[in-house]
Image (cartoon, rainbow, N blue to C red):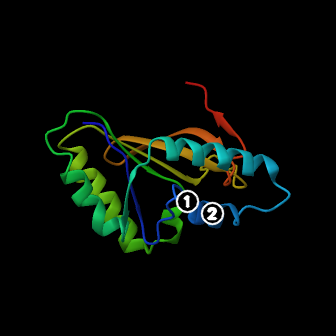
Amino acid sequence: MLSRTGIDRSPIDVTSDEDALLLKSFVWADQTDRLERLDAAIAAVRADPPDLIQGDLADLLPGVLEGLAGSDALTLVWETAVLGYVAKERRQRLYDTVARYSEQRPIAFVQTRRASSGVIAHYALTLQLAPGVREEIAFATHHGDWLDWLAR
């Protein structure tokens, strides 16, 4: 079973014109390239919307992962920037959840974090395929203007 689920304290449902307009209002008016990318993303989500759950990700992620029990498909847990706004103990709870469920089935945890290679003006896209083992796979700006994959 393939599915997509988003967890947010105040999810914006871009299938709604009102919510799409709200989201677009957060983009600076002179950044037309970002608006174009956002319009394309909104169109993609409207064509195949994910399930949206309102609430705390540290509390709800275990239930979402439990709902996938019995599946041997790779589960992708994707986070960009939100954990920087989550208290340390809540962030650790999320990491512990991913580690615990990674022991039961394949989980790829992808997130952005400050680049550890000294490129502090940018972010690294990291991939974790095993508990506690993270690998930087790309560098990016915090607004996604560009993404440079690291050579492998």
For the point 48% across and 64% down, which residue is it? 83
For the point 36% across and 71% down, which residue is it? 55
The residue closer to the viewer here, 2 or 114, is 2
Q: Is residue 5 left or right of residue 127?
A: left
Residue at which label 1 appears: 81
The residue closer to the viewer here, 40 or 89, is 40
The residue closer to the viewer here, 96 or 59, is 59
Which three-letter amino acid code belongs to the residue tagged 1? Answer: Ala
Q: Is residue 2 left or right of residue 34?
A: left
**Classed neighbour count for the residue bearing mark 2: other residues with Cα under 10 Å, few (<14), some (14–19), many (≥20):** some
The mark that comes first in sequence, 2 or 1, is: 2
Residue at which label 2 appears: 23
Q: Position of residue 38 (x, y in %)?
A: 66, 49
Check contact, mark 2 vs mark 1: CB within 8 A: no
Which three-letter amino acid code belongs to the residue tagged 2? Answer: Leu
Instruction: Classify residue 140 by image quadrant.
Output: top right
Instruction: Classify residue 25 by image quadrant.
Output: bottom right
Quadrant, the N terminus: top left
Quadrant, the C terminus: top right
Q: Position of residue 111 (x, y in %)?
A: 49, 50
Q: Position of residue 102 (x, y in %)?
A: 25, 45
Instruction: Classify residue 27 by image quadrant.
Output: bottom right
57 versus 119 height, above or below: below
Q: For the residues carrying marks 2 and 1, which lies nearer the camera in this image? A: 2
The residue closer to the viewer here, 4 or 127, is 4
